[in-house]
Amino acid sequence: MDTSPRIRRVASGLALAGLALAFSTQSLADEMEIRVGYLQWQPDRGPALAQLTPEPEDSGLQGARLAIADNLSTGRFLGQAYHLESVIADSEDALLEALEEMLAEEISMIVMNVPADTLRRAAALGNDQALIFNAGSRDVSLRVSDCSPYLLHTAPSHSMLTDALAQWLNMRRWRSVLLITGPTEGDIAWADAFRRSTDKFALTIVDDKAWTFDADMRRNASAELPLFTQGPDYDVVVVADERNDFGDFVPFNTWLPRPVVGTQGMAPDAWHPAVEAWGAAQLQNRFEKQAERHMTSTDYAAWAAIRSVGEAVTRTESDSMETLREYLLGDEFELAAFKGRPLSFRGWNGQLRQPIPLAHPNSLVAMAPFEGFLHQYTELDTLGYDEPESECRITD
Amino acid sequence: MTLIPKLAALGILFSLSTPLWAASLAYVSNERDNTISVIDMAKLEVIDTIPVGQRPRGILLTPDEEQLYICASDDDTVQILDLATNRIVDTLPSGEDPEQFALHPNGKHLYVANEDDAIVTVIDVETKRVLAQIEVGIEPEGMGVSYDGRWAVNTSETSNMLHWINTETFEIEKNMVIGARPRHVEFTHDDALLWASAEIGGTVHIIDVEALEEIHTIDFRIPGVNQDRVQPVGIQLTSDGRYAFVALGPANHIAVVDAQTFEVLDYLLVGARVWQVALSPDEKTLLTTNGVSGDVSVIDVDKLEVIKTIDVGRFPWGVRITSGSGS
């Protein structure tokens, strides 16, 4: 069928609609204009052996952009405009400087994709002048002991990820684990969280090994790994290798014929390109059209942060940071975020509670939490530190 | 050799006689199988499976029940299935990624929600011309037209809105924020109220059409089912104003609601992830599409009981039932 008349028709229709909209939003635009900041600095993670799929440099920023577009297409019907101010800094100092500039310009909603220590400094700097959304750090202590009342987390913590994995291993009854931990701070933090998850979900670590080899595994994996994975029998190998250094070489090279999960193999994360149920296919399509690549977990966390802002603005009809904060941390807030359940923020530490997809590179395996792991309020709080386990009470 | 003309003659006789005692049939779109299952409503059995376009979702019957319109989402088109021959006989220019649609009572204007493009396309089904494209919120999904033809209402899932479109000017007259992820709208038969489901909000919103104001919100609580699994999608209203049936998604239940008091009367257990519902024209039977379990539940409306489960294709989505004749 010839579709060209349709397209022309569309163009004239859109032009008309555009005029009408421009007019109607213009009169309201002065009332509400929400400026959102996006700040990114991630230190160089060092050379990695597996370099097939590096993290895109604009991972996070593209998610923020899409959320602004999503907010705008809702906001235009309500006279609410959104602007994104973004800075990708090349050092921590440059990042904090950019933050100070945003604060001076009275930007009070800021998404940050930075390491935990930088986030602590940023939260101190922002004090009660800006609501900061953490889209880049999984650090547990930021959610358990050193919380900040104006710091929310849309990125899941290490504990949420490892609880999702441990819950699944328990459900599958693969309860004996060989744990291999890489040398970086992130690897160690991931493994610490996983060790805690094994207590919570009744798994046993039969062997706990540190990865110390520095040989190039692309040449030696088949020779080194079978020897390295010898020992007591295990059901599954769990790898903690956040920067993708050696973990991709573990599958199919283990001494025993066993599956590999963790940061490689089947991995828990905030998002995955294979998530397509619950309308997620539409989000993936919109994202891929805009960014010309897949949506990463950091993109998703930045997207969820700015969509949360949009949802709070729509519902409260306010642009006051304090009003929005109160709404976001209250019982009314729920975000439809393509994971099959409404998402909300934990009132005690500002963590966005969310299902965690478990996926291998090309397919979704499962979505935690799983049926049968009970909780008195919401199954989502079976993932990560629950209220009694956290020292934080940011809404008190 | 002589058999063939005889059989052909029989065939003609048969096809001539079918309209006299046509059975009531249900049509079910199978999103992941690219097929339509045909269910004989007397036998409650699948009697045919028809291959159609890619990712069929929303379906509707023309008022004369001679054709079924099918949103073939991944083919970016609306297909027309001729129900006498079960063949695709035509397509309509639907715009990208059509998901749900509604036919104006004039039988000519088809309102299509284009999910990926954030627009509603209005098509004249006779001339196949696109009459208008209306910008709406993100991920337009549900479409409903009032029985008097005055309003077309679209839901946008990510903008959480109802867009009220004037069917004479094709312009939006009112945008209304409701619960999270609105999926489906249904006018009462007297056009006094609009029922709208919010999947993530877990609610159904009742809108006064004259005042364009929400007058009531229905919450659902099913013992033993986690609250965030309660995700309302499809709605059907009986013409006598007695019942509303609401599909509750992964809660795997149909809520039976008193359409006058908005009180939930009962929850009926059906298949996994129940999406859409359809009443038979005599309103004695309700069918539900259960996406994850790949089947259709049959509910006896008088007894409010599930009486049968029928296997169909993978991820059944939409369902429509013909009245048949002589039955």
Image (cartoon, helix red, strand yellow):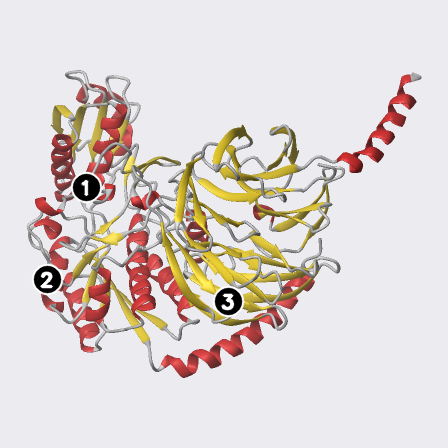
Q: Earlier in the sequence, mark 2 or mark 1?
A: 2
The dot on residue A36 is none
Callout 3–callout 2 Cβ contact below 8 Å: no
Badge 2 is on which residue? A121
Q: Chain of mark 3?
A: B
The residues tagged by marks 3 and 2 sit, at their Cα atoms, a distance apart of 53 Å
- B40 or B266, which is in the foreground? B266
- Residue at the spot 51% in from the left edge and 70% down from the top edge: B210
Q: Residues within 10 Å of mark 2 (few under 14, many from 20)?
A: few
- B287 or B289, which is in the foreground? B287
* Residue found farthest to the right: B2
Camera-near label (3 vs 1) is 3
A84 left or right, relative to B206: left
For residue A212, say whether it is visible: yes
Amino acid, disc 1: Gln
| x and y, in percent, of residue B161 in the image | 43, 63
Q: Residues within 10 Å of mark 1 (few under 14, many from 20)?
A: few
Badge 3 is on which residue? B209
Amino acid, disc 2: Arg
B321 left or right, relative to A119: right
- A223 or B222, which is in the foreground? B222
Amino acid, disc 3: Val
